[in-house]
Amino acid sequence: MKIFAISFFDRLDDFTCKSLLSQVSNTKRERLLRFYNWEDLQRGLLGDLLIRKALIEKINLNNNEIYFSVNEYGKPYCSFLDDFHFNVSHSGSWVVCAVDSNPIGIDVEKISQIDLDISKNYFSKKEHEGLLRSNNPIEYFFTLWSLKESYIKFIGKGLSHPLDSFSMVFSNNSKINIEVDSRILENTYFKQYNVDKGYKMAVCSSHQDLPEQPVIYSINDLTDFFILK
């Protein structure tokens, strides 16, 4: 498994943006150009490029040979490569991507002020009660949210799988488990990462071999790889 992350704080200049947009599919490019906010365009663009870079490095594929399919729940996958699974997430100025030979889920969330009452709609009763007891409920909310989202994305069913149908359980030895109908699920592993002080990031996998840290790329890394090489 490999985990990649990239951040941006400024708008790409026109030349760089157009050059990088030329590296994605026509369908993806048209979809990105419909975004009203440049931040949304850049998040979507960088996520696509992270996957492409990982694919090219894995099987020495030409970029124009890469295409993505979508499952019935809207999760993209590589139909031409059975042992390559990926997942992308973005929030605020961060875009993250996880790739593995097995299904994988990743989520990053920017911590922000919210109405904690919404946890009643998305969290289990046990999680909501834990939130109310927390010394830092806002941070705890996004810890739970990122973990739960990573699991939803891991199983590939999107929000058709209710977030309140399972609970995140934190054991005394720092292990993170998932509980469904009072039963701890086996072969489901989680790891949290600190990519930025104001963010929560989590990965869910079917095995324990999770990287200690993500590989951090810069915009220059992507332009060098796709445009200048």
Image (tube, helix red, strand yellow):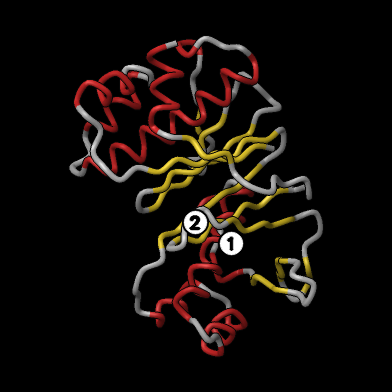
Q: Residue furthest bottom?
A: 133
Position in image of residue 161 (x %, y %): 56, 58
The earlier-in-sequence mark between 2 and 1 is 1
Secondary structure of residue under mark 1: helix
Q: Quadrant of the N terminus?
A: top right
Q: Cβ–Cβ below 8 Å for labels 2 and 1? A: no
Q: Amino acid at mark 2?
A: Leu
Give whichever of 209, 132 is nearer the camera: 209
Q: Amino acid at mark 1?
A: Leu
Question: What residue is shown at x 59% (from left), y 44% (from top)?
Answer: 214
Which of the two discs, 2 and 1, sits closer to the camera? Answer: 1
Q: Quadrant of the C terminus?
A: top left
Position in image of residue 49 (x %, y %): 44, 28
Q: Quadrant of residue 101?
A: top right
Is residue 201 toward the left or the right of residue 110 in the image? right
Question: What residue is shown at x 65% (from left), y 52% (from top)?
Answer: 204
Mark 2, residue position:
159
Position in image of residue 225 (x %, y %): 46, 19
Count of numbered badges drawn on the protein: 2
* 47 shown above or below 202: above
Mark 1, residue position:
147
Question: What residue is shown at x 43% (from left), y 31% (from top)?
Answer: 48
Secondary structure of residue under mark 2: helix
Give whichever of 68, 54 is nearer the camera: 54
Position in image of residue 36 (x %, y %): 18, 42
Estimate how packed mark 1 is, as few (under 14), some (14 to 19) or many (20 or more) residues with alpha carbons within 10 Å. many
